[in-house]
Image (spheres, grey):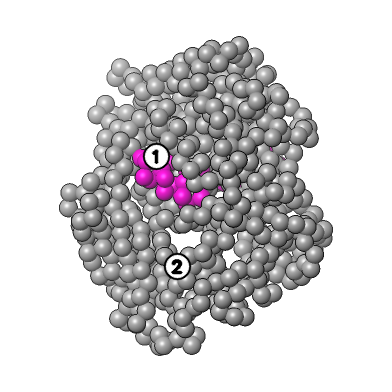
Amino acid sequence: MLDIRRVLASAPKKHTEETLNALMTVWGEALNPSEVLSEHPRPRMKRDNIVVLNGVWNYVMVPFSGASDVEGLAQETIPSRWDGEIVVPFSPEAPLSGVGRTLHPDELLWYKRVVEFPKLAPEQRLILHFEAVDWRCACFVNERLAGTHTGGYLPFSYDITDLLDTRERAEIAVCVYDPSDTGTQLRGKQMLSRGDIWYTAQSGIWQSVWCETVPAAHLEELTLQGDMNGYIDLHARSSVHLENSALSNSRLFDNATLELTLFDADGRNVLETTLPIEKNGEICARLHIDEPRLWSHEAPYIYEALVALHVGSAVDIVRSYCAFRTVKVEADANGVSRIHLNGKPFFIKGVLDQGYWPDGLMTAPSDVALLYDIQAMRAAGFNTLRKHIKIECERWYYHCDRLGMLVWQDCVSGGNSYSSWHTSQKPTLFSFTWARFQDRTKRHQEALSAADANYQQEWTAACHAMVRLLDGHPSVAVWTLFNEGWGQFDAKTAVESVRALDATRPIDAVSGWYDQGCGDVLSIHNYFRPLGAGWRGRHTSNAGHGQKPGDGRAVVISEFGGLAQMVAGHSSLNHAYGYGNFATADEWKAAVQQELAKAESLQGEGLAGYIYTQLSDVEEEVNGLLTYDRKINKLSC
């Protein structure tokens, strides 16, 4: 039975330009602009010689009417006048940046900073890293182009050694173009006219900027991925800068090797091996240890790794880690398809995590803030976080690895402006349409805002890059490809391509509706009907005493709840968006607990898990278990 009153109450409203109430987290209040997110940005690939470049930069926004492709940005002239200072890596729209200004689609955002570097030895290189810049950018070092990048959610790097006028100093300038939701690029939940479930758009540098000194021959990528049987898959890619190098010869990798040593939590050596390097610099190997300690939610056991690349006389030493665990969808003893962790059924008890903050927007104000969210949800009894339509900084996954929090990882959505009818109203009112809307036809792709060929190409490339970036994190358990039809196209082909890259994780092809019968999960959103509706009967077949999926997929309610409770003084607006109407905090708390208990009770009827909406309030949404500023835990107050 559809809850019409709740449907009407949740209808999108006309978005207005209301000013958000000023909210700060305790970490934002304590922020020191000269000591911002100073931790190593890549815990799975750590070297000692790094300099984190977060902190105060110069910035300016300038009118723009030129070519917005990478070639056009590469031709732009570095400004001579600057508007002021910005605290990187917070976007100019974020209060912690110190700017408080929206970048518009007809403007460019420029950054500049002069950096002092440690002196380089003759056979060393200096690599400049950006963890994420939204959306397209060109980077200049000492007024010369270092490189360009397109894509707002993934890291990229430049070797800037040859652009240094001296070995110890450089002026870095970055030019950024971001059309936000006026374009078709991947943008997640950002919108220039925010409101309801859409949040303040942000632009520019929003994750850490840093540099490191490396040998001329060094590792560029390293992934260690273990399974419950003790096998570990190693993939690494090395790079060598040959110019003016004693290493330069036509048979560079003939005697090159990679040494791997694995240590348990007590520091004992459990694996030591030396591997040859292929002619193209790649290293791929399957290794094995006996009786591995397995990683799980209850006991997240981590093995430390020391990796040494030897090419000629050059040695590159990297510290990393890995874990042994297996995640699969398979039938339980009663023939019901469920998610299994290390060979045993594992009921997903998850929370939707948008990864937004009132003072930093998509950038957490500190590393401790990232930890707080994970720990608070673990203490509340949840075992999974669904990272929603966002790729988080790598330190967040590192903390999930250490703390045993499983991650249900979404791809980032994009495309043209979404049709409320096709992505919300029709599937809400008429659930029978969920399995009757094919996403391979041009007409249906247009309806789902996904027909643009450039968008499809960018989505596919970003999806594959996300899988390669995160596949070494044991916490990452499931990939979600599309959500509620936002920019959805050809999910079957997408599943096949992701499976070819990573066959070790289940795939949630389509979360919400417009199921294409592919992937490992039947993924349902249910805010307006009894929780058992939407999969019992239509998507299942009777068998024995219960019901089980008829197509071998696990059934998960991947969004539900969303019960609203505003906390005075801790909300971005004086009105709310969410579901339900509760007179007191105690009534809200009882209703949330009742919803969670209902979902868990469906485990006996074949449900494999749930994702409750959501971890924290975000702007107009007040359906979080925590307030937006993280100062109130509504479940425990």
Mark 1 vs 2, N-terminal side:
2
Element marked by disc 2: loop
Contact between marks 1 and 2 (CB within 8 A): the answer is no
Q: Where residue 287 sits: x, y (%)? A: 24, 60
The amino acid sitting under disc 2 is Asn
Label 1, on which residue?
406
> Residue at the location (60% across, 74% down)?
169
Q: Name the spot of residue 625 as percent of width and height, x first.
A: 52, 26
Q: Residue at x 41, y 60 (%)?
A: 45
| Near-viewer residue (58 or 513) | 58
Q: Position of residue 631 (x, y in %)?
A: 55, 30
Image: 353 above or below 567: below
Q: Which residue is mark 2?
A: 49
- Location of the N terminus (image quadrant): top right
Q: Residue furthest left?
A: 290
The magenta segment is 393-421
Query: Callout 1: 10 Å neighbours few (<14), some, many (20+)?
Result: many
109 with respect to 404 (left or right):
right
Residue type, label 1: Leu
Residue 198 at least partly seen: no
Marks 1, 2: nearer the viewer = 2
Per the image, is 415 magenta?
A: yes
Q: Residue at x 74, y 71 (%)?
A: 75
| Distance (Cα) linking label 1 and label 2 | 31 Å
Check disc 1 and report its element: helix, strand or loop: strand
